[in-house]
Image (cartoon, helix red, strand yellow):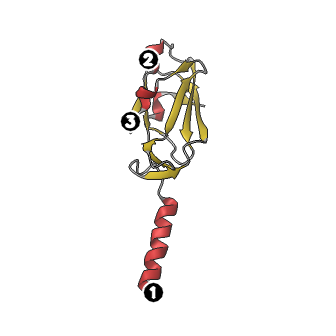
Amino acid sequence: MKFALLALVIYLSYEAVTDVSTNPKIVYDCDCVTTYEKVYEGSFQNKNQYMQNPYVNCSDSVTRFATASVTINDTIKMHFEDFNSSAFEIPLMDYHFKVGDPVRIVVKHYGCGIPKMLNPEVYKLK
């Protein structure tokens, strides 16, 4: 009995501290209707940005990636095909920014899976 209780406590503790930043293969259960925004603001450093994109398990039994949309400086919208993978690139260099130009990236995601910036040194965050 003590072993079973200890195993349950360890399992619950593991579930509480595990997040997408340490394990991108985790599948989170989501409603996949509600989206949230993760906003990154900084200045362009002449490099592209890379994001880790976790899986989410929607209530309709469909597994998809967490990112719902990506917008750069409130005007440039990326196509779904660009971020439909476990990692994707935000091609900032394609948009002819100058070094030091302000950049605002808005990543809309399903609430239970939060995309992670893999190379934050690429642009100076505010």
Measured as percent of width and height from the top left, residue 45 is found at 48, 22
Question: 69 above or below 20?
Answer: above
Q: What type is the residue that disc 1 sits on?
A: Lys
Label 1 and label 3: CA atoms lie apart by 43 Å
Measured as percent of width and height from the top left, residue 75 is found at 59, 18
Measured as percent of width and height from the top left, residue 27 is found at 43, 51
Indicate left or right for 81 with 39 as reference.
left
Q: Residue at x 43, y 15 (%)?
A: 94
**Contact (CB < 8 A) between labels 1 and 3?**
no
Look at the numbered disc 1 and give the secondary structure of its residue.
helix
Q: Can see residue 93?
A: yes
Residue holding disc 2? 93
**Which residue is most to the front?**
60
Q: What type is the residue that disc 2 sits on?
A: Met
Q: Residue at x 47, y 57 (%)?
A: 18
Label at residue 2: 1
Q: Residue at x 41, y 27 (%)?
A: 81
Residue count near mark 3 (Cα–Cα under 10 Å), binned few <14, some 14–19, many ≥20: some
First reached walking from the N terminus: tag 3 or tag 2: 3
Q: Nearer the viewer, residue 106 or 83?
A: 83
Residue holding disc 3? 85
First reached walking from the N terminus: tag 1 or tag 2: 1
Q: Can see residue 54?
A: no
